[in-house]
Image (cartoon, rainbow, N blue to C red):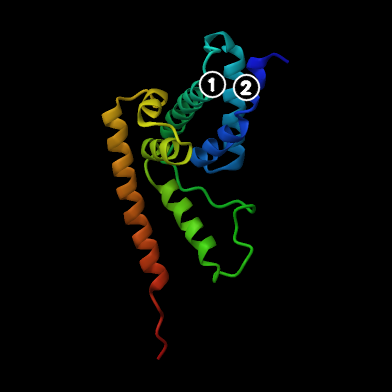
Amino acid sequence: MDDRKKAILAEIPRLRRYARGLARDQDRADDLVQDTLERALIKLDNWRTEESPRRWLFTIMYHLFIDQMRRTSHRAEQEMLPLDSSEAIGEPAVQLDSVAALDIMDALQAIAPERRAALLIVGVEGFSYAEAASILGIPAGTLMSRISRGREDLRARLDDADRRRNIRVVER
């Protein structure tokens, strides 16, 4: 196996993490990673070998994700995906960290896909604003706006979830 293919294979864990954040469904995320890898191997000559393949692969993945979103948007408005069995809480709800993590994932899934993609690629994957803007194919100002609005959306949704959790039922 040549060095280019090894470098691409080394990025699979990061691709899977980003795909899970975008799709929130394990099967759809795995399909997205597979489609990304297939496209990358077909277009291997487009990658500049002096650079890490990470940015190139994330660009491919994001464009594939947007294409999928466009295909599904005309069918029906996407509804929030239910948690699969691997994401369900196995401990009682007193596990506040688990509940908070689920609230964050639910809030992240509920915001617009463009804002979610921007937040994940900068906040989780660690790309700079310039790299992220290039990957997403948008100007840096648009990226910063999406991140800012995405953070506002998350804060609002998490404040609502926190308020709902703190409401007590009073029995008479």
Q: Position of residue 17 (x, y in %)?
A: 56, 39
Q: Position of residue 89 (x, y in %)?
A: 60, 61
Q: Residue furthest front?
A: 50
**Amino acid carrying mark 1 in the image:** Ser
Task: Read off the residue under disc 1.
Answer: 52
Image quadrant where residue 129 sits: top left
Q: Name the residue carrying label 2.
A: 7
- Going 29% across and 43% down the picture, which residue do you hit? 149
Q: Quadrant of the C terminus?
A: bottom left
Q: Are marks 2 and 1 in contact (CB under 8 Å)?
A: yes
Mark 2 and mark 1 lie on one chain; the one further toward the N terminus is: 2
Q: Quadrant of residue 14?
A: top right
Image position, residue 92 (x, y; %): 59, 70
Amino acid type, label 2: Ala
* Quadrant of the rendering where the N terminus is positioned: top right
Classify 29 as above or below 103: above
User: Which x, y percent locates residue 124?
Assistant: 47, 41
